[in-house]
Image (cartoon, helix red, strand yellow):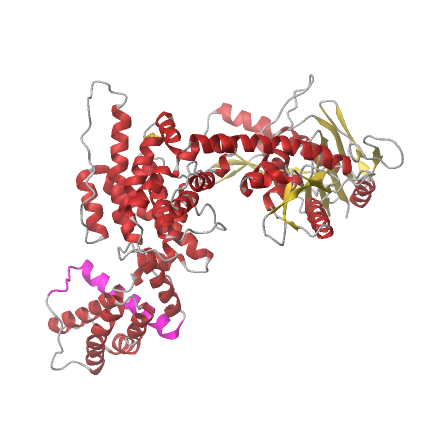
């Protein structure tokens, strides 16, 4: 069947927009084609520095004839509504059909040529394309990311005739901006009539169409250059994605840098290369450190092998690194205390005070958390006090992505305790799923304090994530807390949230009263010396101090539960098992995960599946009777005429009572599940062989109490009513 080829050729498209543009072009084309009744055999898009390309296989030459239903106004509606519908449908009233009190129009639509539909589709796509940023040029009213130069649109090897703002569709494209077949320089136009000719022509005119092919070409070329000089490429996927969108004919070139700059922190060199120049760094395999070289990706293949390009780029890099050296030298001279003073003038959030006040909260929280994770309290407070100082440094001002990391370097340069320097360096970690988790106790204390303050602070001012929006990265902060805790930290999460909430409440009051100069002071809520025996008590204690706190902390715990579900789901665990365990009110994430894993294993066994079915049967019976007013009052016993299944289940419950309690106390949840598995046979026999709702009140009451005892025993492990299946 015929093929459609579309190319939208423009000035340079920003690399960061190209992947999204390819997805949007594919989506919009599919939607328009589907609306016309077309189901193509294949549809593929390509994006590059100067072109968006669409190729669609298997379109018919014309649209099929079809019948269309139009729903009109209700019978008896005002005449104006009916007249408007008739004009739209192009019919008279006697051609309408009444159906369920509504006027319906049935139209026979003759199929249109595909070229007409494609022309309308392309114009709609171009005029409605969702670029993040767009522009107009000249006298045209058309908006595009950069000036649109050509439209290539060919269907069934023939040009689709149409024009948009003076740009006529044709069968001409052009190759590389500078490199040219034969002699001379400049883009060389050429004609194509299908995708095979198009792809072949671009390759011959020094354009690599497919972004994945450009990436492979860059990576292979970089590694070849490194191998020839006994070097190793410092791979950087983000940079690779970016440079693949900058060059149509990417050609790696190895250059040399001044070795004197290697005494700067490696991250500074790499960031300067990456951010300013889009260079790849290389390392010396013998030492593992950076080598005095770089790789730049040229967009031309020069006769001298890139020697001139390398020299020019080396000069620019030297200038950039000279700036970095200046920042480093000046920052080392200034030190932490002046930076901390500057934080008093930096607003963290209008409702949460300054950055300096945030530092105070992190210091207090770190002091609270330190003994719980085995860290020195004084060191934790000092590390927390200095953790945000580098935000005022010149280096972080130039390279914000180095915050924290530079603080660690400056701490070492100032001769501070290496543990404190590591804690400053690592307190933002983990920043993503592939980022390392801090494990040193001091680093853990500061990292948790930083993330908990962020979470509680923004929840306290009702700045929670909504839908896909999360401007303060609270989901990432919660996942960071979860990953740190699951790495081996046993932390009473609820209690720390309560303490953080108290600090956040103070910050809100300070921020509010800063706008009320007639108020001389505030009544502090800070009372960290409270002891809590459990999660619920902690929440209620917070609620007694701040009416909003109980609601907010419960929302935060639910937020952590949702994030934990995401984490466990990525590991293949069921989200309903997380709900079943969280329902117990436990806030020890390590213990929660251990319960979930044991429950997951248990429910894959026959004993687990059958016991769950028995639990649900028992639970349904109990719910029904409890709705009628039955309550389990007093103990259960063996009645003189009790049946064998009753006695068996009674004895089984008595036999597992202590072993189950011991297993739960030892947090051996596998053993706890094993004990519960012993109930499977007795529960099945009881439910199959005993009439629970006996007409004898004493029998009925005792049998219901036995089922309640089964529910209570299993409820010590998880709320099985929330488990699906």
Position above or below: 240 against 169: below
Q: From this viewpoint, is residue 35 visible?
A: no
**Does the stretch in magenta take in 606?**
yes
Position above or below: 474 against 41: above
Q: Residue at 66% of width from left, 47% of height from top?
A: 39
Q: Name the quarter where the C terminus is drawn.
A: bottom left
The magenta segment is 605-633
User: Looking at the image, which residue sits at the far right?
Assistant: 182
Q: From this viewpoint, is residue 604 visible?
A: yes
User: Looking at the image, which residue sits at the far top?
Assistant: 139
The part of the image, by quadrant, that contains residue 689 is: bottom left
Q: Residue 596 or 533: which is nearer the viewer?
A: 533
The part of the image, by quadrant, that contains residue 567 is: bottom left
Magenta segment main secondary structure:
helix
**Does the stretch in magenta take in 50?**
no
Q: Residue at 46% of width from left, 38% of height from top?
A: 403
Q: Position of residue 423 (x, y in %)?
A: 39, 46
Position above or below: 548 against 558: above
Q: Residue 549 or 438: which is nearer the viewer?
A: 438
């Amino acid at each position: 069947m015929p093929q459609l080829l579309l190319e939208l050729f423009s000035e340079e498209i920003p690399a960061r927009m190209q992947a999204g543009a390819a997805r949007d072009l594919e989506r919009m084309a599919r939607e328009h084609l589907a609306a016309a009744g077309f189901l193509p055999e294949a549809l593929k898009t390509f994006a590059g520095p100067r072109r968006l390309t669409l190729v669609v296989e298997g379109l018919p030459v014309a649209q099929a004839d079809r019948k269309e239903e139009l729903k009109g106004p209700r019978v008896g509606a005002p005449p104006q509504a009916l007249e408007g519908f008739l004009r739209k449908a192009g019919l008279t009233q006697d051609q309408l059909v009444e159906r369920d009190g509504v006027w319906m129009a049935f139209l026979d639509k003759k199929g249109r040529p595909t070229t007409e539909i494609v022309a309308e589709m392309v114009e709609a796509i171009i005029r409605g394309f969702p670029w993040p940023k767009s522009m107009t040029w000249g006298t045209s009213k058309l908006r595009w990311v950069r000036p649109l130069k050509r439209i290539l649109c060919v269907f069934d090897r023939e040009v689709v005739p149409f024009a948009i703002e003076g740009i006529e569709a044709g069968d001409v494209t052009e190759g590389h901006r500078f490199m040219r077949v034969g002699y001379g320089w400049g883009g060389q136009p050429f004609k194509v009539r299908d995708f095979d000719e198009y792809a072949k022509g671009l390759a011959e005119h020094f354009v690599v169409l497919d972004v994945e092919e450009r990436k492979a070409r860059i990576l292979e070329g970089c590694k070849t250059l490194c191998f020839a000089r006994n070097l190793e490429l410092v791979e950087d996927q983000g940079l690779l994605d970016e440079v693949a969108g900058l060059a149509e004919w990417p050609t790696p070139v190895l250059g040399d840098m001044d070795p004197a700059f290697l005494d700067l922190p490696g991250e500074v060199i790499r960031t300067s290369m990456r951010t300013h120049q889009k260079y790849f760094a290389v390392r010396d395999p013998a030492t593992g450190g950076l080598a005095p070289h770089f790789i730049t990706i040229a967009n031309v293949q020069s006769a001298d092998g890139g020697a001139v390009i390398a020299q020019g780029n080396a000069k620019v890099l030297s200038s950039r690194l000279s700036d970095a050296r200046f920042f480093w030298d000046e920052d080392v001279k200034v030190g932490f205390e002046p930076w901390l003073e500057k934080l008093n003038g930096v607003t963290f959030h209008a409702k949460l005070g300054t950055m300096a006040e945030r530092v105070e909260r992190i210091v207090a929280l770190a002091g609270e958390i330190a003994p719980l994770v085995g860290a020195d309290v004084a060191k934790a407070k000092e590390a927390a006090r200095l953790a945000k100082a580098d935000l005022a440094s010149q280096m972080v001002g130039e390279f914000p992505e180095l915050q924290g990391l530079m603080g660690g370097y400056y701490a070492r340069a100032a001769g501070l305790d290496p543990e404190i320097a590591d804690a400053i360096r690592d307190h933002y970690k983990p920043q993503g799923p592939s980022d390392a988790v801090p494990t040193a106790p001091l680093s853990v204390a500061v990292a948790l304090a930083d993330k908990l303050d962020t979470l509680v602070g923004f929840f306290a001012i009702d700045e929670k994530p909504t839908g896909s929006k999360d401007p303060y990265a609270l989901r990432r902060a919660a996942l960071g807390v979860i990953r740190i805790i699951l790495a081996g930290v046993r932390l009473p999460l609820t209690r720390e949230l309560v303490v953080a909430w108290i600090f956040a409440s103070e910050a809100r009051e300070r921020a509010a009263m800063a706008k009320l100069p007639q108020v001389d002071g505030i009544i502090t809520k800070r009372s960290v010396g409270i002891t809590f025996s459990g999660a619920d008590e902690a929440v209620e204690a917070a609620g007694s101090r701040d009416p909003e706190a109980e609601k907010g902390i419960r929302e935060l715990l639910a937020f952590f539960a949702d994030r934990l579900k995401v984490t466990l789901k990525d590991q293949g665990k069921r989200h309903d098992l997380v709900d079943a365990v969280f329902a117990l009110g436990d806030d020890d994430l390590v213990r929660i995960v251990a319960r979930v894993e044991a429950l997951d294993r248990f429910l894959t066994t026959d004993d687990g599946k059958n016991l769950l079915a028995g639990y649900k049967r028992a639970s349904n019976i109990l719910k029904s009777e409890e709705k009628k007013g039955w309550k389990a009052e007093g103990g259960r016993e063996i009645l003189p005429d009790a049946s064998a299944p009753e006695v068996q289940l009674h004895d089984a419950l008595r036999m597992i009572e202590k072993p189950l309690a011991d297993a739960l106390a030892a947090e051996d949840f596998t053993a706890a599940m094993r004990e519960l598995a012993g109930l499977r046979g007795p529960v099945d026999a009881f439910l199959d062989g005993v009439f629970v709702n006996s007409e004898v009140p004493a029998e009925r009451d005792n049998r219901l109490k036995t089922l309640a005892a089964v529910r209570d025993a299993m409820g010590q492990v998880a709320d099985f009513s929330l488990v699906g299946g």
